[in-house]
Image: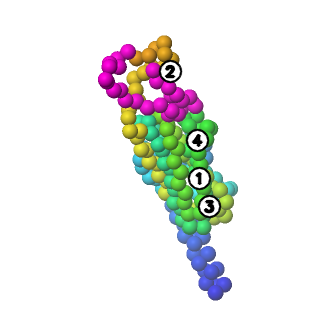
Amino acid sequence: MKLKNLLFTLGFILCFSLQTWADTEPDNNVYTGADPMAENSTVSGTIATPVTDLEDWYQFTTTSDGNITISFTCLPLTSYNRIYLYDSDGTTNLGSAEGYGGATFTKNGLAAGTYYIRYYYYSTSFASAYELSNTVIPTNYANDTEANDTYLTALTNLNENDSVYGHIAHRYNGGTYDEEDW
């Protein structure tokens, strides 16, 4: 039984040592190395070891306000890795998830803009291949045309028995929020 386990482990290591690395992210840096990623898409990559390839960065831009879901799956299933979602500054952490073989999390109420995903080697002692996805679910109503959040600049185009649509409480890149409409 020990010989069978040893042969499996050696075969697995050989498989990863001969593979072509799937991602092109060169230097584990958000600004100089983030690979572009389309909105609502999936990319593939690999993480090696903490010595040679600690993390991969991806950048994507959303076209509408809404909720962003990020997920990953990885092989082998014994790989324990983590994903983070960052604001456009590449340093403000908006959320994270970690797990063996994969994880998913959603950040609600984000304004359209540029975001970064960091796929991070967490506690795996060997290489792992992964697929990373982002999904954007747009907010039900488009943002309103109200310019700011004071009664002094209230819109005057709401007639009696009329309706307007908009949304509030979305986080803009940089950390401000659309807190109220007049």
156 vs 172, left or right, is: left
Q: CA distance from mark 3 to mark 1?
A: 11 Å
Q: Nearer the viewer, mark 2 or mark 1?
A: 2
Up-down: is 29 above or below 155? below
Q: Earlier in the sequence, mark 2 or mark 1?
A: 1
Is most of the magenta stretch helix, strand or loop? loop
Q: What is the three-letter code of the residue carrying label 3? A: Tyr
Q: Residue at x 40, y 17 (%)?
A: 155
- Determine which residue is flagged by label 3: 80
Percent position (x, y) of residue 159?
32, 18
Q: Position of residue 70 (x, y in %)?
A: 50, 50
Q: Amino acid at mark 1?
A: Ala
Residue carrying label 2? 149
**Residue 97, disc:** 1
**Distance from label 4 to label 3 (Cα)?**
20 Å
> Mark 3 against mark 1, which lies toward the viewer?
1
Q: Which residues are magenta?
A: 156-182
Say if the magenta span includes residue 152: no
Quick check: marks 4 and 1 in contact, CB under 8 Å?
no
Q: Earlier in the sequence, mark 4 or mark 3?
A: 3
Nearest to the eye among marks 2 and 4: give it.
Answer: 2
Q: Position of residue 32 (x, y in %)?
A: 57, 39
Q: For the residue marked with disc 2, what is the amino acid?
A: Asp
Horizontally, residue 43 falls left or right of residue 46, namely: left
Q: Which residue is mark 4?
A: 94
Front-most of residues 17 and 115: 115
Query: 5 or 53, which lies in front?
Result: 5
Name the residue type under label 4: Leu
SS for callout 2:
loop
